[in-house]
Amino acid sequence: MKTLTIKNTTHANATLISNDFIDHYMVSANGEFVKIYLFLLRHLDDPCSTLSVSRIADYLNNTENDILRSFKYWESKGLLALDTDAEGNITGICIERNPILSTQETSPLKPLRQQQPEATSNIGKFSDGNASSVKPSKAIPLNSFRAQKELKNLYFIAEQYLGKTLTAIEIETITYFYEELGLSADVIEYLLGSCVENGHKSIHYIRKVALSWTKAGITTVEEARLLSANYNKNCYTVMNSFGIKGRAPAPSEITYIEKWSGEYGFSLDIIKEACDRTISVIHQPSFDYADKILKKWSENGVKHLQDITTLDQAFQKSKQEKKSVKPTKSVTKNLNNFERRSYDMDSLEKKLLNTN
């Protein structure tokens, strides 16, 4: 009897995903991390695959740091193992096809308030002048399974970014972002990453950024990314106009920049004009001097560069008018200051006649 050949075409162009992954891992993971994990599954055991961290980043429109963070995250969850060389570079990835769920993954955690009673006991100390006007965009009970999973993940990610074990204050602050400010786990993760990448690991600085994002109504990573891009652009333009290179703006300088774009509502071209004029007049960078210029423009209702030109023309016209009108000095002689003399006119006349 002739041997039969059976071909399977059912899954010829498909990637199988474990139900355990969907039920227990996907729901609490960052969306970008899920995308990267699915991409790895797609290329699992592909003999033609020539993947690298940079290639994955280019293909998925991510940074290499995003890719490496996702690898570390899934490694912490036991879904993959990383092979590295002597220098710490990733040389291989082993994906666990059927991950074994831990006890924490299969059963709800104890309420966070019981585990860390201090986590919200001092929330009030995080409420400053800016926070009083900030209202949370959502309220997720901390004792819910979803909140427990997301916060646990955020603590882990924060430790990776900060490169150390979190202190009680740092744990409280992250919990505050989540519960009181109502920022989503994705937004908080992006907040941590963007601050650290810009050289700011202080939890107090990160809190200020979180408050400003909440005040601006940020609810998604895309909105946060756009706001961060505008913020970075403003800082770069100001520092470049002042000729300051090789460092990020100091907190006091950031306060000025935020004031100019926020309180005054000036566009970047007007702010740059004030910085340029500062250098032109005093020949050195001065945020205080530029602030005085911008404050004056704000009081005069400047909205566009043309408005500044109009103010300049009005100032020059007023200056010329003052020069053209020169006050005349009237000199009056007080005759009373001179000694009066009396003359005998008849005697003078006789003298004149005798001389002839």
Image (cartoon, rainbow, N blue to C red):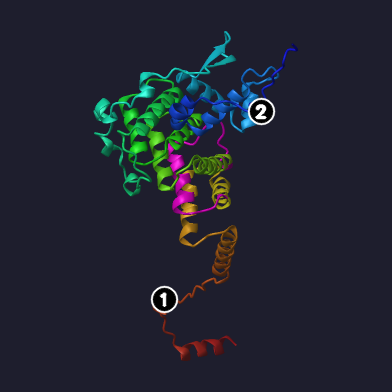
Question: How far from the left and from the top, in percent, is residue 151?
Answer: 37, 30
Rendered image: mark on residue 338? 1
Q: Amino acid at mark 1?
A: Phe
Q: Can you say which quadrant of the picture contains the C terminus?
A: bottom right
Please tell me whether residue 168 is drawn above or below residue 263 in the rendered image.
above
Disc 2 or 1, which lies upstream in sequence? Answer: 2
The three-letter amino acid code for the residue at tag 2 is: Asn
Extreme residue toward the front, this view:
1
- Residue 84 place in picture, x, y as percent: 56, 12
In this view, the mark in front (2 or 1): 2
When the figure is inspected, residue 256 is found, relative to residue 161, above or below; the finding is below
Which residue is depicted at the point 56% across and 39% down? Answer: 236
Q: Are marks 2 and 1 in contact (CB under 8 Å)?
A: no
The residue range painted magenta reads: 241-268
Numbered disc 2: secondary structure: loop
Q: Position of residue 177 (x, y in %)?
A: 37, 37
> What residue sits right under mark 2 in the picture?
13
